[in-house]
Amino acid sequence: MSAQVRSVAKIKIFIAGFAAFAMFFGSGNLVFPLLLGSKSPTNWFYSSLGLAITGVFVPFLGLVAMTCLKGSQDAFFRWLGRIAGWIIPFLILLLIGPFGVIPRCIAVGYGAWQSFSEQTPLWLFTLGCVGIIWIATYSNCKIVDVIGKYFTPFKLGALALVIGGSFYFAITSQQGIVSSSAAVSPATSFKESFFEGYHTMDLMAALFFGVSLVHYFKAKENDVIPFKPTLIAMAIGMFLLFIVYMALVYLGAAYSAQITHLPATQMLPEIASIALGETSDYLISFTLVVSCLTTAVALTAVSVDFICEKVAFLRQKRQLTLALSLIITFIIALTGFTGIMSLMAPILTWLYPFVIGLTILNIAVHFYKRRKSSKLDQNGKKAA
């Protein structure tokens, strides 16, 4: 193990790794893998590979890019010029924040909540979620510590019970994967899941979560960032995300006959109810609501901080910015999961590939400069 890794406490690396997983694994991560598995049961493995590229590997590249740039979003978007370099990240922030992913988290959580309390109106559930998010983000504390130490243990434990129990039941009960009447080829399944990974929006989230993760490792006395420990922590989070994705795509395939007629937000509750019994409704709802709220809390924290930094008249007005963000979140969440996705999908079609290109460009330029600098140092030593 390198000296750089040894200089950072292992527990700090694991806290950051678990926090990374908890930040990313939210609403879309629970819904889209199940949808993909149910649509193409016999090709579930190809579906999981396509999703792994755009839903795991590409977001990891985003985290790598932010690490290379020491957590600077300005440096990431510097290629676009001053005006576009402000507009594009602000648009991304609105999509992963109060106009998109945060209300989507609430909508998915509501779908789970309905599994045992159908009478709860959407507005009341949304109001409760907004209240919890407000309490969790009111003080400007270190979000990585809060999520890694407090939210993640509950989230991982509950997910392990629900997903693990459903997975075990599917195998031991010989829950066979039934071929769909409208079977598609492996290539088609791979392609569809590849583009479905855009909708997780995890690459865009990585550009904001990456700032929190990088700053978590930054030494207080200077701007030095331990490169390897930071990447190890991020890799731990992305590996956990990959494992859960694989399991969810398989569950969608194994239970496809029972869930294809259901709304996307109610698929996992139905699977868990079949596998674990109706008495598990409370556990299922708790799991999904906590999973969605964790991501919503993380996104709210980073979006509020970004807006306070970038919008002049809101600087030093964090509480006002937080209030405005949560009011917008409340209004958008009332449109439901389908309404939110209809708003986001057209924008993501062109914006996501563009951000992928910027990510690759930033990483390539960083390592090119690093290699060039290394060669100059070597030549200088030889000359001396």
Image: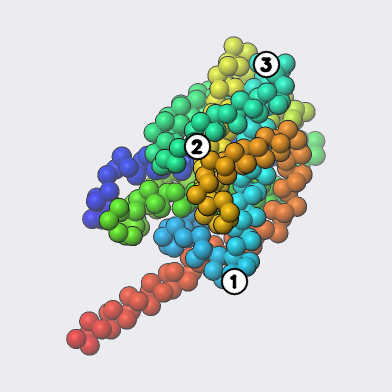
Q: Nearer the viewer, residue 45 or 50?
A: 50
Q: Nearer the viewer, mark 3 or mark 1?
A: 1
What residue is pinned by disc 2?
137
Seen from this angle, which residue lies furthest right? 182
How far is the residue under mark 2 from the one under mark 3?
27 Å
What residue is pinned by disc 1?
81
Q: Position of residue 212 (x, y in %)?
A: 44, 49
**Amino acid carrying mark 3 in the image:** Ser
Label 2: how many residues lie within 10 Å, few (<14), some (14-19) or many (20+)? many
Question: Measuring 50% from the left and 25% from the top, which residue is drawn there?
Answer: 158
Q: Position of residue 39 (x, y in %)?
A: 73, 38
Question: Measuring 55% from the left and 25% from the top, which residue is drawn there?
Answer: 287
How far is the residue under mark 3 from the one under mark 1?
50 Å
Q: Position of residue 101 (x, y in %)?
A: 63, 42
Q: Earlier in the sequence, mark 3 or mark 1?
A: 1
Label 3: which secondary element: loop
Image height of 358 relative to 131, above or below:
below
Label 3: how many residues lie within 10 Å, few (<14), some (14-19) or many (20+)? some
Q: Are marks 2 and 1 in contact (CB under 8 Å)?
A: no
**Amino acid carrying mark 1 in the image:** Gly
Q: Are marks 3 and 1 in contact (CB under 8 Å)?
A: no
Q: Earlier in the sequence, mark 2 or mark 3?
A: 3
Seen from this angle, which residue lies furthest left? 384
Name the quadrant of the C terminus: bottom left
What residue is pinned by disc 3?
117
Image height of 365 relative to 122, above or below:
below
Q: Position of residue 311 (x, y in %)?
A: 58, 55
**Amino acid carrying mark 2 in the image:** Thr
Q: Is residue 193 left or right of residue 375?
A: right
Picture quadrant where residue 178 is located: top right
